Image: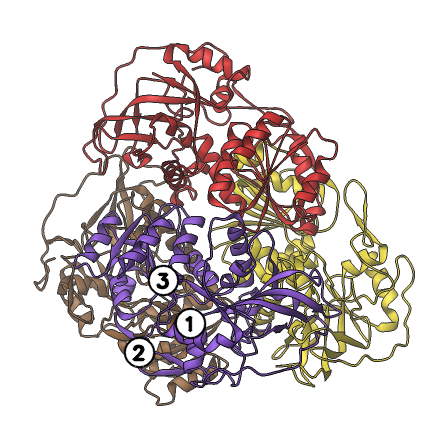
Chain colours: A yellow, B red, C brown, D purple
Amino acid sequence: MEPEKPLEISEVQTPKPTGSEVLVKVKAVGVCHSDLHLWEGGYDTGDGFMKVTDRGVKFPVIPGHEIVGTVTEIGSAVQGIAVGDNVLVYPWIGCGNCSACRIGNDNVCDAPRSLGVFQNGGYAEYALIPHFKFLAKVTGMDLEAAASLACSGLTAYNAIKKSGATSQSNVVIFGAGGLGLMGVQIARAITNANIIIVDIDDAKLQTAKELGADHSVNSKDPEATQKIMTLCGGKGADCVIDFVNAPPTVKMGLAIIRKRGTMTLVGLFGGAIELSLVSVPLKAITIQGAYTGNYNEMVELLNLAKRGVINPIISKRYSLSEANTALEDLKARKILGRAIINP
Amino acid sequence: MEPEKPLEISEVQTPKPTGSEVLVKVKAVGVCHSDLHLWEGGYDTGDGFMKVTDRGVKFPVIPGHEIVGTVTEIGSAVQGIAVGDNVLVYPWIGCGNCSACRIGNDNVCDAPRSLGVFQNGGYAEYALIPHFKFLAKVTGMDLEAAASLACSGLTAYNAIKKSGATSQSNVVIFGAGGLGLMGVQIARAITNANIIIVDIDDAKLQTAKELGADHSVNSKDPEATQKIMTLCGGKGADCVIDFVNAPPTVKMGLAIIRKRGTMTLVGLFGGAIELSLVSVPLKAITIQGAYTGNYNEMVELLNLAKRGVINPIISKRYSLSEANTALEDLKARKILGRAIINP
Amino acid sequence: MEPEKPLEISEVQTPKPTGSEVLVKVKAVGVCHSDLHLWEGGYDTGDGFMKVTDRGVKFPVIPGHEIVGTVTEIGSAVQGIAVGDNVLVYPWIGCGNCSACRIGNDNVCDAPRSLGVFQNGGYAEYALIPHFKFLAKVTGMDLEAAASLACSGLTAYNAIKKSGATSQSNVVIFGAGGLGLMGVQIARAITNANIIIVDIDDAKLQTAKELGADHSVNSKDPEATQKIMTLCGGKGADCVIDFVNAPPTVKMGLAIIRKRGTMTLVGLFGGAIELSLVSVPLKAITIQGAYTGNYNEMVELLNLAKRGVINPIISKRYSLSEANTALEDLKARKILGRAIINP
Amino acid sequence: MEPEKPLEISEVQTPKPTGSEVLVKVKAVGVCHSDLHLWEGGYDTGDGFMKVTDRGVKFPVIPGHEIVGTVTEIGSAVQGIAVGDNVLVYPWIGCGNCSACRIGNDNVCDAPRSLGVFQNGGYAEYALIPHFKFLAKVTGMDLEAAASLACSGLTAYNAIKKSGATSQSNVVIFGAGGLGLMGVQIARAITNANIIIVDIDDAKLQTAKELGADHSVNSKDPEATQKIMTLCGGKGADCVIDFVNAPPTVKMGLAIIRKRGTMTLVGLFGGAIELSLVSVPLKAITIQGAYTGNYNEMVELLNLAKRGVINPIISKRYSLSEANTALEDLKARKILGRAIINP
């Protein structure tokens, strides 16, 4: 892949794993908005465009970070993984050496080596995984459905956990898209909080309620702020989790966050807001970012999926030669839920 | 005290403690910027003026929340405190019933009853303390010097702890005024971090270094940002603690915070900044407010002072009849360090 | 109540609440093993008998700490609670002043004032509650069923949380009695762990599986230890939660705990074990006690019950005049599940 | 080294680092009690002898896990470490794949590969380190003095941190030997707790006071228990840290631990105690093991040493050919403080 150019399929030699490496025959690879950002070359930051090349991406690169498949060959030092195992790949690989990696948080590494971003990913027949420790076995559930757990599921899981929601919390989730709906399911599965979903689309709000939200508010409603406050018992939200992270949602979030509340920003929509400085100490609020998640969280999430308390759903399938169409469809908002490519 | 009017001394009957109440003869009461905010009636929030009456203050009220004195009478249910004890008063009293108070964080209560703000404080001969549990005995150190530990010391202590600084951290502290200098002493006393102090005043920077900062940077230096980055090993600050919390310091803080870093906003200077939304998740940073501290922290701080690892210093004294002068002097920036009133 | 004597009903004047006090007309009060310990005057500690009077109990006292009822009168300072409210009473009241109480952990107070133990409880028509903050409103669920949440439910909840179980944990629960079955339900409700229940009674094991345990092992099975190890993937339990806490269960727990594992002792069965000292650092294990729970946990638990994810069940009812029979039945193990008295 | 046989010096070829490996010319290697345990083949566990071969040690092996030296050659994938760097080696290497290693706690790995225990260590001219991430640069302090920070210093640091001591704690430390004296220095450096040292040797107690203990108690004093209680304000110790971990110290620890207190067992002396089960939940105490420490803690400790707040001291030096004498001297308790071998 190169920015703004159509993806091309190349014939490459299937790599041979050595040492701790593992070769995975890709069964499915998720099509993600990050692939689009990569294809478009960057993000809108509110006061400019953050190029992915400035963040260290080197083109050309094979995209695809939501990879499931079957192990076909292993290096001599591999332990606990055998040929024939069905696996989900942890793609947010770090340097292994920085202070984040040393405690297992590769996802926020100083010098990331993520698969499908900084090194070749899964839009391919085979993927060479640099170390067996980045694999999680998938049993007792649909292998292809597990793909999205490596990215959108993981991001939602990390954000919900980081928000600190408990059974006593009023939790307001912004955005009932793919990420937000997964967030609702996870919040329902791991907390007994009062969950309020906010979006501009009534159909999506309805889906969110079916997946576990207690209440929904359409943010186009002129009384949305007041309605959310009432649903939060008049004091505001303990936890705001913003899967959109655009100026209107963050502003509404700041309007309904309670004293001591936590706002977790997840989405990469972009833009900027005016932040009143004195309100931060006076209300003792916390504004924090959440970015994907770590390997342990991915394994916990797999357990939730196996138990059936969350249900990642595949809504559309493409072949590898249709990769361009898949990305165009995603850009044109033609994909509801999660699409995968079957190489 | 009433907003914008000179303080007047009234003759009132000395109250009589009942139940768990304690009567304290005030030996000294600190003169604090919050007293000024109260006197001025509010804060500049960046997009307006936040009135203290809108936050629940009812005038007239006796100001003064940094109170030390001697117990002269106790209610019948008082335990562990006796007539004659020298005490420091915890002024950030909460409702006792909200989710903050229930875990001992009265300082961020939903419905605060702080002494000297929401109920009568220590600009008086006697102060009636509503419950003996808000007192801490002062032994082995100068009683009057302890006064500031209830507010500026406590605020600095809470902020340093909340910042999460460890012996591996690069800590950047903005502001070498009274609060910031206390912050430097405390950071030195409770962590072994690399401490960098930033201010616009070289004399204050020098004092900060004498009190324990490892490095200092004058923010008027056009290369200040780059210098701080270098002092942080090129990666930026793990912990930014901003005792000023004005647009220029917060902007510089955001420029030098590292990935995964924590920015703790403490000061009540006011103003607003433009916050780029996408950078929060991409850098996985945390921006949080710190506001005074809880009773346990005040007791820990007293222990630090008794051990001599921090040294609260009184720089100026006034009598009760000079209270107006004291506030005027504070406003005119004529007080370096901490002033007290001896009623 | 006095040790070893039949309980007697006395006519007393209904107390009148003042200040923050609340008068509750008791609708139901749970009959708990602790009432029996109180009646018997103490516990077997393994090397003697720990008298409740040595722990500060003063007879005569009205027992009963699992109290639900309706508010009939309130003191003048009461807030947020009104006459007619149905409430569950938090009985583990502390001194309010020690380091545990200051952070809301009254349940492990240095000088406890628990209702039904150190001061009069709920085996009575009316109970005078010392402060409105010890009440939690009960709505949307059966009031009488809530009674046990103040003690057995709360103890189980606190223990499961303290054990640190996550969705990746192998959790072994000893004891499928009233406490253990509640523990299984709660573990299932708040974690997605692999739950293994161990008991000597196959019928109880079956019930535990119906309530959410993944696996069961009868500890009379000579291969029980090996079976548990296998169910824990060969490495042993991450979390052992022992609701019996007798020598055989603790020994088996130590045999199947994994390196870094946590053993939470809850039951008050008594006895002693020989603990090999060197194994504690070499395996880096933790052995900790859990005792009832705090107010916040009780409220969280009420939320779980309202959502229906846990179901406290009443198995037997007595009138107040049958209190002696109730305790005799409990002693004779004639009560399965939870009994209540309806005064 | 093989159990119970004299150590022999062999001529081996200097290894050549590849990939991420680093070759270190050993400047000094500490002589540690663990080397003795290895030489003796195991530990007394109270009810038997735990053989090191049962824990996975394979003889012959080169002992020595406290290694400092100079980098002489690096593999092609090494980053951030250069030939000529003076380094301290982190020896508690884990499998990299278990749940402990994944969060950076290699020291409590399921399948440890520690240098000088499970693979060749530093009683040698050169040591081949498997990955550059196990090295920490040593600058600004004496290189040889840093050696003990990899083991005794690290163990003490991890134990003090794990104990949860704060500025409000009464901390009782058992054992004023090498480990305990380091523990006292560290407790003094990172907390402002009230520190009480307990030992049977008055000279060592005196040293402990010079290094920062507030009080000392000789445990041979018949009133030792009562004295400790008094020094803890009558309530007992918040944190007991037992660097001996033998039956007499643990029994005394259990006698003086307060409600909610934490007992951290560190020493590998051996033996067993009778543990009363009911007291664990009733007092809500925690008994936990601490074993060496992780890489991050070692780096934090290096920072403390550079700042001079702790002072690791070398008391005796041997050449490599005197290794047998060194171990014999250690066994015969002829070494006070820390001995090193200079290969």
Question: Residue A169's spot in the image, x, y percent?
Answer: 50, 50
| Mark-to-mark CA distance, 3 and 1 | 12 Å
Name which residue type carries label 1: His
Q: Which residue is mark 2?
A: D46
In the image, is residue A49 above or below residue D298? above
Q: Which residue is mark 1?
A: D33
Direction from residue D18 to residue A278 in the image, left or right: left
Tell me which label, 1 or 2, sits earlier in the chain. 1
Name which residue type carries label 3: Gly
- Secondary element type, mark 1: helix
Direction from residue C251 to residue A213 in the image, left or right: right
In the image, is residue D22 above or below residue A220? below
Question: Residue B330 — which label?
Answer: none
**Nearest to the observer: residue A332 or residue A59:** A59
**Are the numbered discs 3 and 1 placed on the same chain, yes or no?**
yes
Question: Residue C196's spot in the image, x, y percent?
Answer: 43, 77
- Secondary element type, mark 2: loop
Question: Residue D177 — which label?
Answer: 3
Residue at the spot 36% in from the left edge and 10% down from the top edge: B9
Residue B235 can be seen in this image: yes
Question: Residue A45's spot in the image, x, y percent?
Answer: 77, 45
Question: Residue B159's spot in the image, x, y percent?
Answer: 51, 39
- Secondary element type, mark 3: loop
Q: Quadrant of residue A96?
A: bottom right
Q: Chain of mark 2?
A: D
**Nearest to the observer: residue D133 or residue A215:** D133
